[in-house]
Amino acid sequence: MQTSNKFHPWFHRYLLFLLLCTFILITAGGLVTSTQSGLSVPDWPTTYGHFMFAFPLDQMVGGIVFEHSHRMIASVVGFLTVILVFWAWRSEQRRWVRNLTYTALAAVIAQGVLGGLTVLFLLPTPLSVGHATLAQSYFALIAILALVTSRWWLNTGDDSSSRRLKNPLTGLAMMSTAAVLIQLIIGAWMRHSDAGLAVPDFPLAYGSLLPSLAPGDLERYTSTLIAMDLRSTADGTILPSQIIVHLLHRYWALVTAGFLIALTVRLFRNSANNHILRRFALIVPVLIALQIALGAFTVLTQKSVSITTAHVVTGALLLVVTSVITAVSIRLGGKPVQKTVHAFRPEEAAA
Ligand code: HEM
Ligand code: HEM
């Protein structure tokens, strides 16, 4: 059965606009954490007792600039998601796409509530990790919606291929997406349990590949961190869990990079006649190399605000790219790619 949904250019453009707004929102959220402004506004949903949108601009100073503007941008994205649901309800014929928009709305509401609770409960690690992870998942969901409403999607493939999930590219793309998602969660756990600089050197960790966690060694690491001004005596001894989560993030980065390199090779092999796959084959290695470099510099610059935030944002982009590659690969199924592209070019020109 051929998919019969009509292409709605403005609906698709709207989704691209929402994707851009979400990108800005994730950058703004990353800045809140990187500048440690999470508690600059202690109340929620009000801002220092004011209705959020009536907060006086002359009181936007210090960390309030980051936290309050993050809330404002989040409200815009929430509002745009409500419009998205109505628009899809009126114009989208595919039930599964409408369901995806409902999921996006549920996610954005849950995300707002999580953000508020994070503030009211003074940034507990699990809530902050949940907030960080849901943010990136919402971003990936909007990217998938933008893809499935594109002219390319509607003109490519059909809904009948039973070989779709047997495509080796799809399996690899799914595993890469899962590896990136796990890495994001470990990264968020590290970031929100104050473990980002639990190991202050790179590429080694306290001079070795696997530092000892013996109590005497933990005391020695703590003295090193105090000498480097990364910890105060009042913070007590560094916890083994902080070092473990940090090392886990570094080593899982290698696993993730392995998946992404394999994905790149597979994309190149499948891309002989497909410009989309070729483009992804160029984007993936650039993003992973950039992300590892940003991770290294996050440590070496002792968490420079811009570099750390860029690391968070590039992590989100990696999730978007791997999710989109998975969806593209599912759409292409096991079919020869060239046929699909040539068959639909004239239609594209006519539409
Ligand atoms: C669509 C809704 C929202 C999205 C996509 C979003 C996204 C994000 C992201 C990506 C971060 C950075 C996490 C990190 O770097 O680890 C963040 C941090 C934060 N967000 Fe949101 N946010 C949303 C709504 C809200 C709302 C409504 C609040 C209300 C107070 C809020 C409060 C916070 C706080 C306090 C932080 C800092 C947490 C910390 O440092 O532990 N967010 N947000
Ligand atoms: C596959 C490669 C990597 C990905 C996808 C990735 C992703 C992320 C993400 C998304 C976060 C923030 C999570 C959040 O709060 O939302 C993070 C945090 C962090 N990452 Fe990575 N990362 C990678 C590799 C590395 C490497 C190689 C290092 C080097 C040591 C590193 C160091 C860090 C540090 C130190 C933080 C915490 C920053 C803080 O405490 O504020 N990352 N990572």
Image: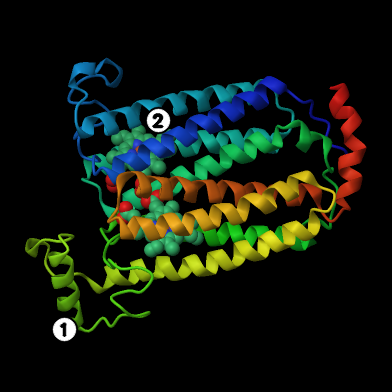
Residue 112, position in %: x, y? 38, 35
Q: Distance between the residues labelled 1 and 2?
A: 46 Å
Give the position of the N terminus as an image quadrant. Answer: top right
* Residue placed most toward the observer, 27 or 50: 27
Which residue in the structure is indicated by mark 2?
74
Image quarter of residue 270: bottom right
Q: What element carries label 1?
A: helix
Image quarter of residue 185: bottom left
Q: 91 left or right of 110?
A: right
Looking at the image, is 4 positioned above or below residue 329? above
Q: What residue type is labelled 2?
A: Ala
Residue at 42% in and 39% down? 26
Q: 51 left or right of 293?
A: left
Which residue in the structure is indicated by mark 1?
216
Residue 255, position in %: x, y? 53, 69
Q: 21 left or right of 124?
A: right
